[in-house]
Amino acid sequence: MPADIIAIASDHAGFQLKSMLREELAELGFAVLDLGTDDTESVDYPDFAYAMSAAFRDGRTKRGVLVCGSGIGISMAANRNPEIRAALIHDSFGARMARLHNDANVICFGGRAIGFDVARDCLRTFLETEFEGGRHARRVEKLNNPV
Amino acid sequence: MPADIIAIASDHAGFQLKSMLREELAELGFAVLDLGTDDTESVDYPDFAYAMSAAFRDGRTKRGVLVCGSGIGISMAANRNPEIRAALIHDSFGARMARLHNDANVICFGGRAIGFDVARDCLRTFLETEFEGGRHARRVEKLNNPV
């Protein structure tokens, strides 16, 4: 699997922002694995978080983007899988911290909460920022082994 | 267990905001179950999310407040437990949606990301807003039974 595959998924409320971020990812040179939804017909956000979860489990991707209306529901669902560290992001501070401290591998947005230009800025920061390691590695290890 | 018990926990970076929100909850008439941390000495945020998780499992609380530096790590850890629906909140739109659509039972904040007055506004909205049910109940049910 090339490191430059990024999976993307959303519900109906996130469909528009997902489509725009998908184009942005393609322009940046990533291979995009689009897990749906494919239009604005009402669907259930957990189904698309679990599609992302399956893509991680099957080794089809190591990074992802998820969008629902507020970003809240889809980030809850994604974090049910200990392989996923999904961060709901509103600004570049959050995007940077999610990578530096939490080694986040999925970035979540609220399609009704964030504008495209801010989301794009956050996405680029997320993709460009390396995990800091050190004491944060111990904490991330605990995240992967919930008690 | 009275319905008005609220558990609260944070790491060192969230300690100051936790202390302020704890006072706010007491002023609003809630019984606060403080799960630590108790000072600004460096600790690991997952330990405090898992303390919240244990309080849910043991029936000591049905609602909680979590704070770390960005709010990201502690919300990831809390959502490892399917009983918990933890929402990372930045504004009252998110706080309202988290209750209306996601029936969130834990609200998360970034102690280094949000000011006290905005966090207090979000907390009040979170506490005052009822779950909308309907189609959202089906989605929440899927959140509690991850695949």
Image (cartoon, coloured by chain):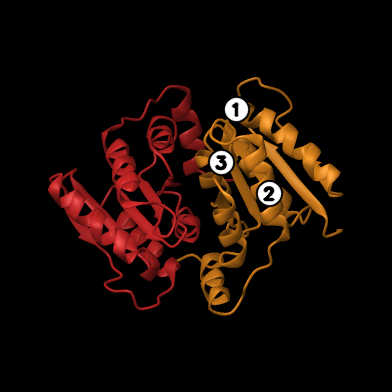
Chain colours: A orange, B red
The residue drawn where x is 82% and y is 60% is A3
Packing grade of label 2 (10 A; few <14, some 14-19, many >=20) is: many
Task: Kindly report which numbered mark, 2 or 1, lies closer to the viewer in this rendering.
Answer: 2
User: Can you identify the residue that label 3 sits on?
Assistant: A74
The residue drawn where x is 70% and y is 35% is A18
In the displayed structure image, the side of residue B131 where residue B3 appears, left or right: left
Task: Kindly report which numbered mark, 3 or 1, lies closer to the viewer in this rendering.
Answer: 1
Q: Marks 3 and 2: CB-CB under 8 Å?
A: no
> CA separation, marks 2 and 1?
19 Å
Determine the secondary structure under disc 2: helix
Which amino acid, by three-letter code, is at mark 1? Ala
In the displayed structure image, the side of residue B10 where residue B61 appears, left or right: left
Q: Earlier in the sequence, mark 3 or mark 1?
A: 1
Which amino acid, by three-letter code, is at mark 2? Leu
Q: Is residue A97 visible?
A: yes
User: Can you identify the residue that label 1 sits on?
Assistant: A13
Q: Disc 1 sits on a residue from what chain?
A: A
Residue A109 lies, in percent from the top left, at: 59, 41
Task: Kindly report which numbered mark, 3 or 2, lies closer to the viewer in this rendering.
Answer: 2
Q: Marks 3 and 1: CB-CB under 8 Å?
A: no
The residue drawn where x is 15% and y is 44% is B28
User: Can you identify the residue that label 2 sits on?
Assistant: A123
Rendered-image quadrant of the C terminus of chain A = bottom left
Packing grade of label 1 (10 A; few <14, some 14-19, many >=20) is: many
> CA separation, marks 3 and 1?
11 Å
Determine the secondary structure under disc 3: helix
Give the total number of marks visible in the rendering. Answer: 3
> CA separation, marks 3 and 2?
17 Å
Residue A105 lies, in percent from the top left, at: 66, 57
In the displayed structure image, the side of residue A108 where residue B54 appears, left or right: left
